[in-house]
Image: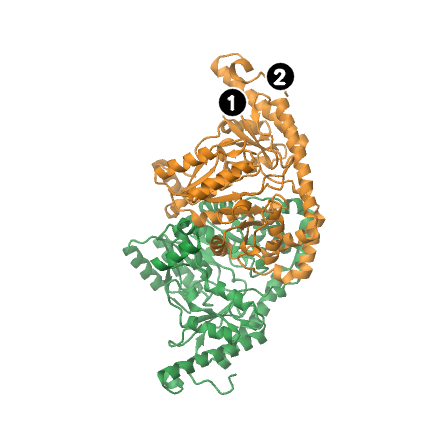
Chain colours: A green, B orange
């Protein structure tokens, strides 16, 4: 995105004859740091700990083929046709069964709207609620794709501190008070309460109740984004916040992580009046979600032991989570990180003298990629953190990647020492240990 | 949509606890008249001349099945995975072949962005360009879905008169001059130049050149939406406006009418700088279009004689167009209508005393549905017109539908006569003939 200032604007004008025609909001549309990494990570020699791609190879293809065959023989003409903006009734009935596993048992298929993946739902909710200058509250750190979408409607994302149990209720209350004193309009609280992307933190049940109580009292809507809830490794996550309150929560779910992201099928469960507006927003944005894909998912859910398949995924990701955790213990014991109870990501806290964003080109040179923490903050923080994903690479590749990463970090520290004219630091003076000689 | 005013606002507040939280733009999101009709039209006893559903039954299902099998065996893991925001390169290469049939031979696959149907492209272009109060120029009448999407970004649609050759250049120049004198910002001209929805008018080549020249001179971008171009009945449409200018035209295409709308695959060809922003907008709205569906379309295009299949569709729709035209000649000869050279719709001009919107409930009672002309105007016009679609019903159903419609219209005219205390009118005094006794 061209920054503000005469020079770059002139450059933009010269390169793009339509430079003066864009809407004001378009200035907020910038390439995410994750996006730039996709190109890099696609080179096979690079171990990518950057992306959030599920390991779809763990899905037996015959399950999709069988669902497709039934769809074509029983609903062919319908699957190839336009559908309604809300999504087909059959998939919405099946979604009730999926949501029941998250503790949501009072929903009606009537209150579900299917979308083109759950990013689409984020976009639609943002479009419905966000005026320029409005505020969205979010965990600190928060999902890069949501931050980008909220910003694309010219809203400001304000982060609220978290601890090991998720959002801090005192910090939430204080943030609300401060923003309201400033005259700001808070439109909703966005939360990934289960196995958060990127922090891997899960909000405790007690915290869910406290956060909900604050939001009710302050009349703040909650946008609960739950793509990873069923992918737990040790014990299930607490029931969804939505299961505790039907009127104040918009709940987002997705088949991207428990089935396939290539199908782009997500869904929203929303209070009645909001659901009505969401349907209109779907129609305005795409007319109707793909009936073809909705039928593939419906028949997959009808025919397969899909819960068993989720158990398969849990096993795959648990093994990778363990590989990541063990590799970090071996190669980067001087730092702290979350050991995720589910989901796709580990959040690594570096020391203050390391800058994950500035270090990335060096990492890519050494054939490992990650996502700098800065991607997950709207306020410039995150330079000393990084997100490491363990969802896609095999355990062996994860170990290789972490070993390379340690190499990069240690090289960076040596460089810093050289500039400072100091000798190698030890844990006693910097909190960072000297890398062991066998690190390579 | 709740209209502005204290009463309805209070009602909204009572019914919806989040009534005060919506963005200003949400007030512009209203249920289209087409949408309300979908529910009605789905009853089998109603002959629907309302919707725009292609006749997908004319597509041999084995073509889709074969494309699916190849996709799964050769690109299974990729088809189930996230893709890039721009769409897979393979489909973009094939799209070049489709666009070449519309006269666009200078495009690069690099300048194509795939979308979730071409409505999604309309939404993304609107999001990129439209600030509140901006103006979009459009034909008079224009596509209901585009009008709704432009309004959902708080832009105003200003119609430009057309004649049998499409947009009137003098009217376009005068409208631009007037709007600029009023200080309005015109962001683009939206046109369905081929077999327009709803007017069925095709812009002549001479007009395309004239319109393009005006837009170049006035520095106004053209948004050319071309879903029906390949569905001609008599002779091909002139080359796309985009084929005459690569820098000033954003071109939208779709597989919804030449293959299947259930797949939701559309595309945009845009000047380089705009294309870059479109990719960011895709990512912000859905992360990436469905790889699964893009692969189905790609393999369909690779394996099938897709041009022959389009020829099949032409035959189906030509026959229906003829059935519609003949039925109108037989049952409603007192009115005027377009005989479409392609596409899905006929535009029927009623007399001034008939109101197509007000008459619709009566029509539904008599088991025929249509779309009132008001749906296709942003300025309240269209009460004396209606759109009749011939794409989905069989020729027999079309004849039945038009017969019922004539019955409705004649009943309405009798009612008007009764209120006026006049006797039945004849063509001599009102331009409307007495219905023949055998009309039922």
Instruction: Decide which of B201, A59 is in the foreground and name it.
Output: B201
Vertical placement of A183 versus A362: above or below? above
Q: Position of residue B87 (x, y in %)?
A: 56, 56
CA distance for labels 1 and 2: 18 Å
The quadrant the N terminus of chain B occupies is top left
Looking at the rendered structure, the secondary structure element under dot 2 is loop
The part of the image, by quadrant, that contains residue B389 is top right
Q: Are marks 1 and 2 in contact (CB under 8 Å)?
A: no
Would you say A345 lies left or right of B17 here? Answer: right
Disc 1 element: loop
Q: Is residue B308 visible?
A: yes
Disc on the earlier residue, 1 or 2: 1
B136 in relation to A438, above or below: above
Q: Quadrant of residue B111?
A: bottom right
As drawn, the residue found furthest toward the left would be A181
Q: Which residue is identified by label 1?
A: B351
Say which of A275 and B214 sits in front.
Answer: B214
Q: How far across and down, in percent of the image, does residue A113 sit?
A: 52, 49
- In this rendering, position of residue A27 left or right of residue A34: left
Name the image quarter holding the C terminus of chain B: top right
Residue A5 visible, this orientation: no
- In this rendering, is residue B151 above or below A230? above
Residue tagged by mark 2?
B436
Q: Chain of mark 2?
A: B
């Amino acid at each position: 995105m061209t920054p503000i200032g005469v020079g770059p604007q002139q450059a933009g004008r010269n390169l793009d004859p339509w430079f003066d025609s864009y809407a004001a909001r378009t200035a907020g549309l910038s390439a995410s740091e994750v996006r730039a990494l996709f190109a890099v990570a696609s080179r096979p020699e690079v171990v990518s700990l950057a992306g959030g791609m599920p390991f779809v190879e763990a899905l037996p293809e015959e399950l999709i083929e069988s669902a497709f065959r039934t769809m074509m023989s029983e609903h062919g003409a319908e699957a190839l046709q336009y559908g309604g903006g809300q999504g087909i009734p059959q998939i919405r009935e099946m979604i009730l069964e999926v949501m029941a596993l998250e503790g949501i048992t009072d929903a009606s298929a009537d209150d579900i709207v299917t979308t083109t993946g759950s990013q689409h739902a984020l976009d639609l909710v943002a479009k419905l609620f966000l005026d320029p200058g409005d505020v969205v509250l979010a965990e600190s750190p928060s999902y890069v794709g949501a931050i980008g979408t909220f910003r694309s409607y010219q809203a400001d994302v304000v982060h609220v501190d978290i601890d090991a149990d998720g959002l801090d209720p005192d910090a939430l209350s204080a943030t609300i008070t401060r923003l309201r004193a400033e005259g700001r309009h808070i439109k909703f609280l966005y939360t990934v309460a289960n196995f958060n992307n990127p922090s891997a933190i899960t909000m405790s049940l007690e915290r869910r109740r406290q956060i909900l109580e604050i939001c009710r009292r302050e009349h703040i809507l909650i946008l609960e984004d739950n793509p990873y809830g069923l992918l737990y490794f040790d014990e299930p996550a607490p029931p969804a916040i939505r299961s505790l309150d039907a009127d104040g929560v918009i709940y987002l779910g997705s088949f991207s992580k428990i089935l396939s992201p290539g199908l782009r099928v997500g869904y929203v469960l929303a209070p009645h009046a909001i659901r009505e507006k969401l349907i209109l927003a779907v129609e305005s944005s795409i007319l109707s979600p793909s009936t073809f894909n909705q039928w593939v998912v419906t028949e997959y859910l009808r025919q397969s032991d899909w819960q068993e398949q989720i158990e398969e995924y849990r096993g795959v990701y648990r093994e990778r989570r363990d590989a990541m955790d063990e590799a970090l213990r071996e190669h980067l014991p001087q730092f702290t990180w979350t050991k995720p109870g589910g989901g796709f990501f580990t959040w690594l806290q570096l020391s203050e003298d390391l800058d994950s964003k500035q270090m990335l080109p060096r990492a890519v040179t050494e054939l490992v990629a990650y996502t700098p923490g800065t991607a997950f903050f709207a306020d410039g923080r995150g330079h000393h953190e990084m997100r490491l994903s363990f969802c896609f690479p095999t355990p062996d590749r994860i170990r290789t990647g972490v070993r390379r990463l340690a190499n990069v970090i240690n090289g960076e520290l040596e460089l810093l020492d050289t500039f400072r004219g100091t000798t190698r630091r030890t844990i006693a003076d910097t909190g960072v240990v000297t890398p062991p000689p066998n690190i390579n």
